[in-house]
Image (cartoon, helix red, strand yellow):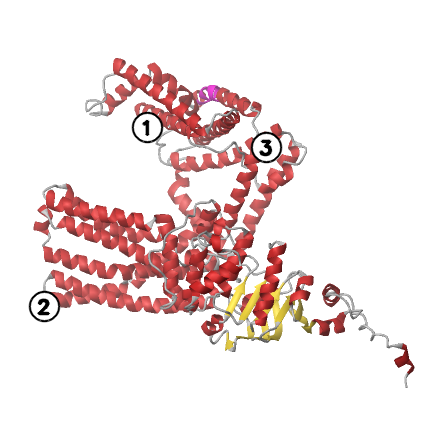
């Protein structure tokens, strides 16, 4: 029977690899794969070959000294302790093994024993653990040399497999407790109580045996490591962290013989966990079926390319209140703005953020007048507009409530009685509005903070107002341009994005995304050349007749006019693209 | 009125629909039937403006879909087999959105009536994720009917509905036609097509096999005059050579003898 399951797994792997390779007939996939491969090679892989840089830490070598490794080992042991505690504390669902719907349909009614099903899952997980181990090795042993990389991978795999086994065992134990009438909250209270007792015990022991933690401890590396030795080499913390250090020991053992020796107790621990899992008589079938159905919905939504649908499938969508009442008359694209603002509100809760904004602004005003000499104020005053500028880079990635989301269901937009330019305009307005509002808030807050204390002496008020006004004028149009470029890329190259039913994934898709990101950046920079020139002209002209503040505003006016013209042309052009957008082309038979 | 002339849709070299022409007048319900892959959904998606046709002319309520897409779509309602809804809008917000897009000024009273008719009133604050499939279909129906469309396209409208839902949908389609809408409906449920539709268009391999009233196509394809649409459909889409048309009904004996 088990051979059938092995066959299933191997055939699935083979066919998945084959279909993956088949995609390479299309240039976009091999180009994406090539770019991603080049990136991976440049950043990580070339360091893994012999002759690469010296290893930095871990079993792959002795790049870091013993003291640092000692600190890292205990830090990671503490982290593992936290993970294990959370596995017992947080989950409230019954034990479920992650079978797919197809596996459930074929295997659950089949004459396959429960033990075989568990073995099948355990085996299948090892493949995921191995991939995870490879992934972590790329990051953790950047610079590792020679054959030690294999040990590094093995060490990661052992850590992940042990954690994996413990998580399953814990889920079985939690379910067993539920079956015996111990509710989730009772269990949590018990664990928290036990944790409190242990914490108090450890604190009391430390108080009696170890010098208190203070400035003298962190004045040098040696003093800190010495203190750490006193804390963890004896007493309760030694015993508390021991199992986790056993798990990590192979990873932190540099030589081959030591590695093999360190593996022995860990293998014993894994064996104990394995016996625990296999001998647990806990029903997992019902919860597994529920989990598989839920996951299938999420995967279907992901394949449809809709993050919103994924959230809906995961039950994370909640009713949001519209920011304004939508009347039935008026400019039709406002309906799309209204709709997308509701979608943004579902993720960011706009009303809460508005309240937070008002409170922060009030605090800034209070700080400016009550503590104007505080040296932190000008720092915060500069940081606020700096964050506004930084938003320009990561804001469009967070705010995706535009065509990038809606084109996953193109039918919804295509049937609307709106010309393409109105669809594009309405779709882009919501993220632009939200991002501009945040940037204006940051500018205003920064401006208030910079009017007081030492900063006001260096930056006259007129200049501050001029800069602020100029930035406030230009930012919405720059944002609009940025979002137009992003939406334009989706409309112009739909095949390069995960839209409709394509659902393609893999490293070549990551490469595609990198290509698109670079392309978008170039288009955006090109779009900003003319406005930049207009700003320079306005500024120079303004400087002939007035000061820096007026010249900046004049420059910004010039830039804004050019940007507005570019945005209008962009909306018009993208509208044409939307009118011609054929969602069936990508999924054509 | 829905007018289609020489509609052709190509995917590369593959012709999903070839030179398809038909007209649906106000008050008519045309059943679009054909085997899987016949081009029914492609035809409907072209007609709804979702995908552009490769060739041909499509007119909805007198407006050319290519030249005046906004005016043409203003009179259109499209119901796909799988209801497509916005995840973040509640039932009532879907109606508000539709009202602004189509400029339906009395949308609130119409919305209340539609939701009451569809037994959705108590669900008006729910999100699509909280609705059953049938309820989602009802919501799509309410949104589609809010602006009193004159051209209505249904793609497998009865999929996933319970018997009561099917009955209501049939009545709804008939009532829409009675109110003067031109309707095209694709479905594999031939007995329901037979019951609801005044005209039938059978397509196969993207081409028209026959178009006419049920009586017309029965006369052309069926071996017996009282044949069901299912028999006609199987005959019309069969790869076998077509049998001889049904013989005329036997005359009464007196007439047979002649004068």
Q: Quarter-wise, where is residue B253 in the image?
A: bottom right
Left or right? Give the position of A98 relative to A524.
Answer: right
Element under label 3? helix
Give how far across and how far down residue A285 sits, in percent: 58, 34
Left or right? Give the position of B251 relative to A577.
Answer: right
Q: Residues within 10 Å of mark 2 (few under 14, many from 20)?
A: few
Give how far across and how far down residue A58 sits, in percent: 38, 28
Element under label 2? helix
| Mark number displayed over residue A64 | 1
| Residue extent of the magenta highlight | A259-266
Residue B152 against residue A494 in the figure, above or below: below
Give how far across and how far down residue A580 sits, in percent: 47, 68
Question: In 3D space, how far apart are the residues under numbered discs 2 and 1 (Cα atoms)?
Answer: 62 Å
Residue occupied by mark 2: A545
Q: Camera-side residue: A575 or B96? A: B96
Q: Chain of mark 2?
A: A
Residue A263: within the magenta?
Answer: yes
Callouts 1 and 3 close, C-beta under 8 Å: no
**Residue A473, can we see it?**
yes
């Amino acid at each position: 029977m088990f051979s059938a399951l092995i066959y299933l797994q191997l055939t699935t792997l083979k066919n998945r690899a084959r279909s993956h390779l088949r995609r390479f007939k299309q240039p976009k996939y091999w180009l994406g794969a090539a770019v991603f491969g080049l990136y991976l090679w440049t950043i990580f892989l070339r360091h893994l070959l012999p002759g690469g840089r010296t290893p930095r830490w871990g079993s792959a070598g002795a790049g870091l000294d013993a003291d640092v490794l000692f600190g890292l080992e205990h830090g990671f042991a503490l982290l593992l302790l936290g993970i294990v505690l959370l596995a017992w504390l947080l989950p409230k669902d019954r034990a479920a093994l992650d079978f797919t719907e197809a596996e459930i349909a074929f295997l659950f009614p089949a004459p396959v024993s429960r033990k075989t099903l568990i073995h099948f899952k355990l085996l299948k997980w090892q493949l995921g653990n191995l991939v995870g181990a490879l992934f972590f090795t790329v990051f953790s042993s950047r610079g590792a040399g020679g054959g030690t990389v294999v040990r590094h991978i093995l060490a990661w795999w052992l850590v992940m497999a042990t954690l994996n086994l413990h998580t399953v065992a814990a889920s079985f134990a939690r379910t067993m407790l539920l079956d015996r009438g111990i509710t989730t909250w009772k269990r949590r209270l018990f664990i928290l109580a036990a944790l409190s007792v242990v914490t108090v015990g450890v604190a009391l022991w430390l108080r009696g045996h170890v010098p208190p933690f203070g400035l003298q401890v962190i004045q040098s590396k040696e003093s800190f490591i010495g203190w750490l030795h006193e804390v963890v080499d004896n007493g309760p913390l030694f015993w508390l962290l021991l199992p986790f250090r056993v798990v990590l020991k192979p990873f932190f053992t540099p030589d081959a013989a030591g590695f093999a020796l360190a593996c022995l107790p860990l293998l014993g621990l894994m064996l104990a966990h394995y016996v625990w899992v296999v001998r647990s008589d806990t029903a997992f079938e019902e919860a597994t079926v529920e989990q598989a159905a839920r996951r299938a919905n999420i995967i279907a939504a992901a394949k449809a390319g809709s993050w919103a649908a994924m959230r809906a499938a995961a039950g994370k969508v909640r009713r949001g209140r519209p920011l304004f009442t939508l009347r039935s008359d008026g400019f039709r694209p406002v309906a799309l703005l209204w709709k997308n603002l509701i979608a943004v509100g579902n993720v960011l809760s706009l009303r809460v953020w508005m309240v937070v904004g008002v409170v922060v602004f009030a605090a800034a005003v209070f700080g400016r007048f009550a503590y104007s000499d505080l040296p932190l104020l000008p720092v915060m005053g500069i940081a606020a507009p700096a964050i506004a500028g930084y938003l320009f880079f990561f804001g469009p990635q967070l705010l995706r409530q535009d065509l990038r989301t809606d084109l996953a269901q193109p039918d919804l937009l295509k049937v609307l009685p709106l010309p393409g330019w109105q669809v594009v305009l309405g779709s882009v307005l919501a993220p632009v509005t939200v991002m501009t509002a945040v940037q204006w808030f940051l500018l205003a807050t920064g401006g208030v903070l910079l009017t007081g204390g030492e900063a006001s002496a260096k930056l006259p008020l007129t200049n501050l107002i001029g800069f602020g006004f100029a930035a406030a004028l230009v930012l919405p149009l720059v944002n609009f341009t940025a979002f137009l470029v992003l939406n334009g890329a989706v409309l112009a190259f739909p095949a390069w994005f995960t839209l409709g039913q394509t659902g393609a994934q893999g490293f070549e898709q990551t490469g595609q995304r990198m290509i698109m990101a670079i392309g978008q950046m170039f288009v955006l920079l090109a779009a900003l050349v003319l406005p930049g020139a207009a700003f320079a002209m306005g500024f120079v002209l303004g400087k002939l007749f007035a000061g820096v503040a007026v010249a900046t505003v004049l420059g910004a006016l010039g830039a804004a006019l050019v940007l507005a013209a570019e945005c209008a042309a962009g909306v018009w052009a993208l509208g044409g693209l939307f009118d011609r957008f054929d969602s069936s082309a990508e999924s054509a038979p | 009125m829905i007018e289609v002339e020489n509609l052709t849709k190509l995917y590369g070299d593959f012709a999903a629909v070839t030179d398809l022409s038909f007209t649906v007048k106000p008050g008519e319900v045309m059943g679009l039937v054909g085997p899987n892959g016949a081009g029914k959904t492609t035809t409907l998606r072209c007609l709804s403006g979702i995908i552009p046709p490769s060739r041909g002319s499509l007119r909805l309520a007198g407006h050319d879909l290519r030249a005046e897409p906004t005016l043409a779509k203003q009179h259109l309602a499209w119901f796909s087999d799988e209801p497509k809804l916005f995840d973040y809008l509640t039932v009532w917000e879907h109606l508000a959105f539709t009202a602004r897009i189509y400029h339906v000024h009395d949308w609130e009273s119409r919305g209340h009536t539609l939701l009451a008719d569809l037994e959705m009133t108590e669900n008006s604050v729910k999100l699509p994720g909280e609705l059953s499939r049938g309820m989602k279909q009802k919501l799509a129906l309410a949104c589609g009917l809010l602006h009193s469309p004159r051209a209505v396209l249904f793609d497998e409208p009865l999929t996933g509905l319970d018997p009561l839902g099917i009955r209501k949908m049939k009545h709804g389609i008939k009532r829409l036609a009675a109110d003067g809408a031109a309707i095209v409906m694709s479905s594999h449920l031939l007995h329901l097509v037979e019951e609801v539709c005044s005209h039938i268009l059978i397509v196969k391999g993207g081409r028209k096999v026959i178009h006419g009233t049920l009586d017309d196509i029965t006369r052309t394809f069926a071996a017996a005059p009282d044949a069901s649409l299912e028999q006609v459909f199987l005959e019309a889409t069969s790869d076998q050579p077509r049998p001889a048309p049904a013989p005329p009904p036997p005359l009464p004996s007196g007439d047979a003898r002649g004068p």
